[in-house]
Image (cartoon, grey):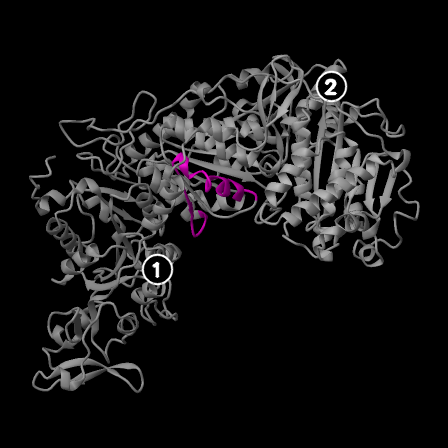
């Protein structure tokens, strides 16, 4: 390939020859298209791109991308991806996981993958249900979710993936949802971030948890229920008639009315993607009293694990030769002479 | 061979025995492992053959003076071929009452006890549950006893250095070592050099330890210990010419893996998680970065193997290591490596099980786990090392099979092999046959899509590195179509792929050496068949039985799965088959299953290796 003539790819170039096997109407279709469009826009090379997944509906994703792909085992995709990245830093790693795969069985690996800050994109498809195993409640299911395993409704408190990610030390946290037009932009921001970029994607499970996210994702009235965050822009929603402010007395976020577009007067705060404290508040905003915070919530890069570790390894290797013979003979040795008379000398 | 020692009743004299067994025992904070290790080095430098058995508690610093806090190090050395750490010690060095109590039972009648009387205080005696001081109440009459206040003598010897009492007493082990060096006519200089190196940053400590070492030596020299002990010189053992060093199994595995990766022409990725007794391999490799080694301490055992699988997928040699409980956690990922057919080496340093079991004690009870312990029909090669030095060759063999057959390989060692040391003839790397890994560079199906599961005549699929232009494909743990590897769980695909995976591993039998008889003849009355670290005691027991005219042979199996092609026939050429192993009969069952031979078990699961006598008795029983 000649570097001077960049290849322009189309969405077709990113579609594998495999028949997509998600349920008709599944939110995964929209996410797949958004990702394929993102890859085209990024000008990515399928040969240098690896999609790594665990187990679950979302984890079938790699089969449908015409890049390299590894469909691993339940919950362990972050660990497999760690090995791939450490073995070849040049590969662009996209991790595909779900609320069961990434937050339940693989929660430990998700935590450490984020904590280490392996340069990659983590897409957590959150449908608040176990789809592939036929509808059990998941760690993100809302309290009281009836399911085959909780016929009387679940009693445990749901996990908040973005709060979990921030708790693990994430340097990039974003949110989107399956059919959102903004999703591709969010994914591009994640890709631009050097480090583990965590993206929670709300996804509609048409069979077991239909329309779970309609409360904020439904197109009608979306303006009032979605807060799309933009770095350097005021946190406005409802067509600019409402905004988010910080109550300095209680140190809590608060919804305020904006009159005549004068958001400054209303005290609406400007989104700063490097503000970790506000990010913590945004991911925990209770929906209903607040709109759903979407878009890039936090983005403040820090050195990646692979650059630190492989840099350390390179330093350790500098000036040393890989002489196996010397290595084998390391430490105290002695020589037995040819006449079998025992040792002559200790070295 | 410990039992060839002079009769216990006659004091050791200038009629030197061929071999001596010494056990150093003390509190786990007394530095017994270090003392043993240095005595081992000195033994090796004197040209004696040797085998060691470090035996320590699971607690790091158990409460001082307690019975469960005793740490021991046994060494068998001599002027003859040594393959075990010895059945029973000739000399027991007991640094406190607890060490005496827990180790006395093993001491040969007439054996020598060297005890630090300074530690036999009322309080320490109580902790060891002694009602009376055994050094004074005549209860040790059937042994020879040398009791003197090593603590006081040590304090006296290091007085000039102005150490605190605690620090000064820490030199006790060097004093004791000094005495041991005198007893066996050893050069002190290597120890002095080692101490100077170890305490380079604190010369006072170096000098104090050297002073203690010299004082212990001088104590023997000046005959203050009377006629009880005489200096004993054991001639060097005749050995093949060459360069030698001592090596533990953990060191040998580490070096073998590095050599294996080099022979494959691959960088090595080692994913590990701390676990006794396997951690030493992670520690060793973490210091070998210049050999293209990347070590990764993962968040758990599963991530350790999963990251190694990821690295193998990306074109490096993935390696992971653990002990039984950790291997159990890796089971599902092992299945993934079998299903995706990626090279991987998995080292299992076995310990007593089940569950947490005996973390610091040895056992061979993970054989079923290695051969069968996964869901589905999930065959993979299993290689078992017989000794510390052999672990080097076995690690190379595991790398070879993994790369040549695109398969995970299990390498079995155990706590005994891992910790024990033996002299090792340093091999010449030029003598190793390389087995370079091949990566697909161009599609194997130029007219269509790449076929990542198209097998060669050995049933092996190509290794394709992500990053290679034009060869994009998807792999996973789900069943796949022949050739394309596309997701396919049709009955025909699963039948065909299961058969193909099995045939590939079975085929390895044709690519491993035929089983040889280690000692004795092919055919006869009795074959004693072993695997792993039972090699030493089986070998010596068979040697002795044969010397007495018995028709018995020793067969030691390295390739546990697949088994060597001729093994069945070989076993059937014997009237009887005895399988000693440190489990309840796992290899015995496997041999019965594979060959319908009436293999009889000899089992031991005490956390201690077999003694030669135990196997001799079983041979007697089988032939009697």
Going 14% across and 53% down the picture, which residue do you hit?
A38
Instruction: Please report, as a chain letter, where disc 2 is located.
Output: B
Quarter occupied by the C terminus of chain B: top right
- Report the side of A35 relative to B510 (left or right): left
Q: CA distance from mark 2 to mark 1?
A: 62 Å
Segment colored magenta: B277-301
The question of residue A58 being in magenta is answered with no
The question of residue B299 being in magenta is answered with yes
- Report the side of A296 relative to B248 (left or right): left
| Residue A249, placed above or below residue A21 | below
Q: Secondary structure at mark 2?
A: helix
Going 23% across and 49% down the picture, which residue do you hit?
A61
x and y, in percent, of residue A22 in the image:
20, 51
Crowd class of label 2 (few under 14; some 14 to 19; many from 20; radius 10 Å): some
x and y, in percent, of residue B184 in the image:
76, 30
Which of A220 and B323 lies nearest the eye of the viewer? B323
The residue carrying mark 2 is B545
Crowd class of label 1 (few under 14; some 14 to 19; many from 20; radius 10 Å): many
Q: Secondary structure at mark 1?
A: helix
| Residue B548 visible, this angle | yes
| Residue A198, placed above or below residue A17 | below
The residue carrying mark 1 is A103
Image quadrant in which you'd find residue B265? top left
Image quadrant in which you'd find residue B40? top right
| Residue B539, placed above or below residue A288 | above
Image quadrant in which you'd find residue A217? bottom left
């Amino acid at each position: 390939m000649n570097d001077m003539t960049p290849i322009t790819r189309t969405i077709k170039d990113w579609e594998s020859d495999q028949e997509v096997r998600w349920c008709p109407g599944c939110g995964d279709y929209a996410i797949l298209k958004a990702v394929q469009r993102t890859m085209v826009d990024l000008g990515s090379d399928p040969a240098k791109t690896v999609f790594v997944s665990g187990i679950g509906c979302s984890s079938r994703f790699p089969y449908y991308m015409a890049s390299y792909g590894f469909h691993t085992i339940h919950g362990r995709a972050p660990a497999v991806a760690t090995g791939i990245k450490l073995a070849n830093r040049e590969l662009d790693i996209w991790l595909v996981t779900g609320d069961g795969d990434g937050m339940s069985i693989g929660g430990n690996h998700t935590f450490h993958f984020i904590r280490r800050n392996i340069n990659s994109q983590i897409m957590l498809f959150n449908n608040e249900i176990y789809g592939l195993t036929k509808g059990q409640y998941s760690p993100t299911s809302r309290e009281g979710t009836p399911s085959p395993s909780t016929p009387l409704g679940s009693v445990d408190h749901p996990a908040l993936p973005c709060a979990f990610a921030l708790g693990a030390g994430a340097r990039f946290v974003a949110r989107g949802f399956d059919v959102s037009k903004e999703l591709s932009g969010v994914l591009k921001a994640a890709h631009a971030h050097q480090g583990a970029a965590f993206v929670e994607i709300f996804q509609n499970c048409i069979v077991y948890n239909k329309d779970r996210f309609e409360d904020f994702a439904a197109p009608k009235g979306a303006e009032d229920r979605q807060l799309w965050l933009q770095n350097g822009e005021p946190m406005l929603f409802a067509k600019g008639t409402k905004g988010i402010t910080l109550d300095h007395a209680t140190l809590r976020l608060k919804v305020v009315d904006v009159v005549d577009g004068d958001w400054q007067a209303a005290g609406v705060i400007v989104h700063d993607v490097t503000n970790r404290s506000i990010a913590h508040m945004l991911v925990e905003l209770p929906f209903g009293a607040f709109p759903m915070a979407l878009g890039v919530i936090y983005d403040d890069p820090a050195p990646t694990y692979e650059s630190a570790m492989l840099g350390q390894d390179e330093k350790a290797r500098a000036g040393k030769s890989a002489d196996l013979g010397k290595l084998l003979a390391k430490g105290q040795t002695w020589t037995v002479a040819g006449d079998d008379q025992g040792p002559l000398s200790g070295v | 061979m410990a039992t060839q020692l002079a009769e216990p009743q006659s004091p050791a004299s200038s009629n030197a025995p061929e071999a001596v067994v010494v056990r150093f025992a003390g509190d786990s904070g007394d530095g017994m492992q270090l003392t043993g290790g240095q005595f081992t080095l000195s033994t090796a430098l004197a040209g004696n053959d040797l085998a060691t058995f470090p035996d320590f508690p699971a607690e790091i610093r158990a409460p001082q003076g307690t019975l469960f806090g005793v740490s021991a190090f046994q060494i068998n050395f001599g002027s003859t071929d040594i393959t075990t750490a010895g059945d029973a010690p000739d000399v027991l060095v007991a640094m406190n009452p607890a060490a005496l109590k827990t180790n006395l039972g093993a001491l040969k009648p007439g054996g020598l006890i060297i005890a630090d009387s300074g530690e036999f205080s009322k309080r320490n005696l109580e902790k060891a549950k002694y009602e009376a001081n055994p050094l004074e109440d005549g209860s040790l009459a059937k042994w020879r006893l040398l009791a003197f206040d090593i603590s006081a003598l040590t304090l006296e010897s290091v007085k000039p250095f102005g150490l605190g009492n605690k620090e000064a007493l820490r030199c006790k082990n060097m004093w004791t070592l000094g005495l041991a060096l005198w007893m066996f006519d050893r050069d002190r200089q290597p120890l002095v050099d080692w101490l100077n190196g170890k305490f380079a940053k604190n010369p006072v400590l170096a000098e104090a330890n050297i002073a203690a070492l010299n004082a212990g030596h001088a104590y023997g020299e000046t005959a203050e210990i009377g006629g009880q002990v005489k200096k004993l010189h054991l001639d060097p053992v005749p050995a093949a010419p060459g360069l030698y060093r001592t090596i533990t199994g953990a060191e040998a595995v580490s070096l073998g893996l590095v050599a294996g990766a080099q022979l494959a022409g691959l960088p090595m990725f080692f994913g590990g998680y701390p676990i006794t007794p396997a951690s030493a391999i992670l520690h060793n490799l973490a210091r070998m970065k210049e050999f293209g080694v990347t070590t990764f301490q993962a968040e758990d055992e599963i991530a350790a193997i999963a990251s190694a699988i990821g690295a193998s997928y990306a074109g490096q040699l993935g390696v992971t290591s653990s002990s039984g409980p950790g291997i159990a956690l890796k089971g599902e990922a092992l299945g993934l490596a079998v299903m995706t057919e990626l090279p991987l080496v998995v080292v299992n340093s076995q310990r007593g099980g089940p569950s947490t079991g005996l973390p610091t004690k040895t056992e061979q009870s993970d054989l079923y786990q290695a051969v069968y312990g996964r869901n589905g029909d999930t065959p993979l090669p299993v290689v078992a090392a017989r000794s510390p030095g052999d672990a080097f060759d076995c690690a190379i063999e595991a790398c070879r099979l993994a790369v040549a057959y695109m398969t995970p390989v299990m390498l079995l060692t155990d706590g005994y092999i891992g910790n024990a040391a033996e002299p090792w003839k340093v091999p010449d790397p030029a003598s190793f046959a390389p087995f370079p890994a091949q990566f697909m560079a161009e599609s194997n199906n130029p007219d269509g899509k790449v076929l990542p599961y198209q097998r060669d005549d050995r049933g092996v699929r190509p290794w394709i590195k992500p990053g290679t232009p034009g060869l994009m494909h998807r792999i996973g743990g789900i069943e796949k179509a022949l050739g394309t590897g596309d997701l396919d769980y049709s009955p025909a695909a699963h039948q065909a792929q299961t058969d193909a995976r099995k045939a590939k591993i079975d085929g390895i039998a044709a690519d491993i050496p035929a089983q040889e008889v280690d000692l004795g003849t092919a055919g006869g009355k009795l074959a004693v068949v072993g695997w792993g670290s039972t090699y030493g005691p089986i070998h010596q027991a068979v040697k002795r039985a044969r010397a007495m005219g018995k028709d018995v042979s020793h067969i030691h199996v390295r390739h546990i799965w697949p088994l060597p092609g001729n093994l069945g026939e070989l076993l059937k050429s014997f009237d009887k088959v005895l399988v000693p192993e440190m489990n309840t009969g796992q290899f015995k069952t496997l041999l019965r299953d594979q060959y319908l031979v009436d293999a009889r078990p000899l089992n031991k699961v005490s956390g201690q290796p077999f003694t030669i006598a135990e196997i001799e008795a079983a041979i007697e029983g089988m032939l009697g």
